[in-house]
Image (tube, rainbow, N blue to C red):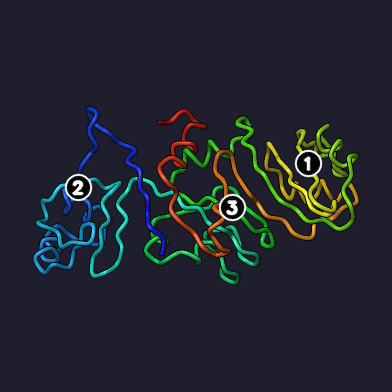
Amino acid sequence: MWKEERLCLKEKGGRRAVERLDKLLCSTGRWSRREVKQLVRQSRVLVDGRPADSPEEKLDPERAELQVDGQRVYCAAFLYLMLHKPAGVLSATEDRRQPTVLDLLPPELGRRGLFPVGRLDKDTTGLLLLTDDGPLSHALLSPRRHVDKVYWARVEGTLDAGDADALREGMTLGDGLRCLPAELEILEDGSQCRVTLREGKYHQVKRMLAARGKPVLALKRLSMGPLALDRALKPGEWRFLRPQEVLALQSLRGVQ
C-alpha cells in the first residue's frame, strides 16, 4: 500500500546495529529457532524481496523488510505511522461497539501495540500519529512542552477580529477552564479559520469557538509540532513516517 521509509535509531561505534535473522524472528514470539531454520530452508522467509540466505544472515532490523509466507513481519524497535483519520472512527485502541483507528491498519500492525498519540473526537478528521514509542508520546503530550497543534475549522456564523483577539488573549470558558493564548487566522468568507493551540484540553477548539457564538461545524487537524498531514493521504489512509519526520519529532525531547 505505502512504501515504508525506515530509520535506524540505534548505532554502535558509528555503525548500524545488526541482528541475526533467526534471532529477530524468534523475538516476535511467533516462531522457535528450529522453526525459523525450517522456514528459511523452505524459502518461506524473504529479506527485501529475496529468499533469505540462511538463519544466521545478519541484517539491520530498522531497514530490512521481512516477510514470512507473504506476510510482513515488523522487527524495528519502534514504529511511527501517520494516519488521516476519517470521521466516525474512535481515537482508541479497541472498542466493542464502534470502529477504532487501529481497525484501519493491517492485522500484522495491530499486533505491535500501536496507540494514538493524543486523540481526536469521533467527528474530527485529520492528522493522527500512531506509534509504540511511549517516551516520545509522553514528550509530545506533556503540558510543559507546549507543542503547537494546528486545526482547520468551519463554523456557523462569521468570524471577526474580536474572535481572533479573544483567543490571542487567552479565554476563560464557562466552567472556569483557563486556556492558553491561541492564534486564530480567519480564512475566505469568515466561516473558516485556522486555529493554533499550544495545549490540548478536552474539546478545546469547539468550546472556545462556541463560547464566541460560532459553533464548529467541521474540524480537521493539520499538524502537530513539526509533523504535517500528508496531502496525498485520503481519509482512512496511512503511511510510515519518513526518517526526517521521525528525527524532527524526536528533537522535541532531545533525542537524535
The numbered disc on residue 127 is 3
Point out the residue furthest to the bottom here: 97
Position of residue 212 relative to residue 237, above or below, is above
Residue at 24% across, 29% down: 14
Q: Residues within 10 Å of mark 3 (few under 14, many from 20)?
A: many
Q: Amino acid at mark 3?
A: Leu
Q: Amino acid at mark 1?
A: Leu
Query: Viewer-nearest of labels 1 and 2?
Result: 1
Disc 2 target residue? 59
Q: CA distance from mark 2 to mark 3?
A: 33 Å
Residue 46: x %, y % from top left: 20, 62
Instruction: From the viewer's side, name the closer residue of 23 and 241.
Output: 241
Residue at 45% across, 48% down: 241
Q: Secondary structure at mark 3?
A: strand
The numbered disc on residue 201 is none
Disc tally is: 3
Earlier sequence position, callout 1 versus callout 2? 2
Residue at 70% across, 40% down: 197
Position of residue 200 relative to residue 25, above or below, is above
Q: Residues within 10 Å of mark 2 (few under 14, many from 20)?
A: some
Q: CA distance from mark 1 to mark 3?
A: 19 Å
Residue 183: x %, y % from top left: 76, 37
Disc 1 target residue? 184
Q: Secondary structure at mark 1?
A: strand
Q: Secondary structure at mark 2?
A: strand
Earlier sequence position, callout 2 versus callout 3? 2
Q: Quadrant of the C terminus?
A: top left
Q: Amino acid at mark 2?
A: Leu
